[in-house]
Image (cartoon, helix red, strand yellow):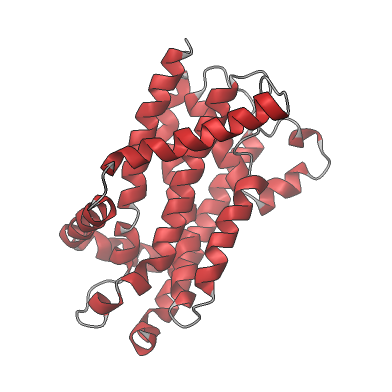
Amino acid sequence: MNLVHRKIKEIGSDWELLLILAKRDISVRYKQTILGLSWAVVKPVATMLVFLFAYKQVAKVQDISGYPIQLVIFSGILFWNYFANSLQAISNSILVNSNLISKVYFPRLIICFSSIAVSLVDFLVGFIVYIILALSLHQSLSTYIILLPLALLITTLIALGFGLIFASFSVKYRDVQQIVPLIVQYGFFATPIVYTTKQLSEKSWFTLYNVLNPLAGIVEMFRTCLIDNYDLLTSQNIMISIAASILVFILGIIVFDKREDSFVDYL
């Protein structure tokens, strides 16, 4: 814990550099694009429409666990896009900024933390779209919406933890860059993004599933914060997810700290 506290303190002392790098990443992301920030709307909406078509026209599914199918799918996609984009950005952050790392010394963690900025902006835009969608469906927002920042923090911690581990090894082993997209691709279907945990909760292996995939509890926490009267989140889900997020984050800091000194040798 002393190591984590020291690393966080280092980042806090250089918050201006963190802000500069974050602004740069946001600017680069939308530079020379016609739609610009609108891509943060187009992607989740397009994904939702594809699954709505698959459920309603192909599988003839009219609802998911009794909740509005549009809100269930969109809230899941909103969560997954933030996690997946953050994970990939963090994992690639050291390699993408190799020229900066090899020339100037500063806490390398700042690069990883600043890379979340674009994903956070996309999430905020998507959140506004969710509110508009919910109101258009005559649905009230959940009273637990005040806990949304907590759900976002938990997601950020686990994305940082895994991202720091992948970033640490990708400097020497470039194969890691091929692994992360596979995790994102398969993880989408292994996590209740376009479905809920209602059917899974009846299985004998559900507890083991939550341990192996703590993202399941986090996405249901997101839905609890967004969808009115959503009651599929259990205390066991959220406790496992919170514990896993903290442990993975600490592990990521430890791994990153041990490998940080060797980055320049392989860049």
Image: 184 above or below 73: below
The residue positioned 67% from the left and 25% from the top of the image is 57
| Nearest to the observer: residue 5 or residue 58 | 58
| Nearest to the observer: residue 143 or residue 114 | 114
Q: Is residue 95 left or right of residue 182?
A: left
| Nearest to the observer: residue 243 or residue 256 | 256
Question: What is the x, y in percent for residue 93?
Answer: 36, 67
Question: What is the x, y in percent for residue 59?
Answer: 73, 29
Image: 193 above or below 100: above
Give the number of callouts.
0
Q: Is residue 93 left or right of residue 78?
A: left
Q: Is any part of residue 233 visible from this angle?
A: no
Q: Quadrant of residue 202?
A: top right
The residue positioned 42% from the left and 54% from the top of the image is 86
The residue positioned 67% from the left and 19% from the top of the image is 62
Residue that sits furthest to the bottom in the current view: 265
Quadrant housing the N terminus: bottom left
Q: Quadrant of residue 105?
A: bottom left
Quadrant housing the C terminus: bottom left
Q: Is residue 190 left or right of residue 107?
A: right
| Nearest to the observer: residue 242 or residue 76 | 76
Question: What is the x, y in percent for residue 110?
Answer: 28, 64
Residue that sits furthest to the right in the current view: 204
Q: Is any part of residue 224 visible from this angle?
A: yes
Question: What is the x, y in percent for residue 250?
Answer: 47, 62
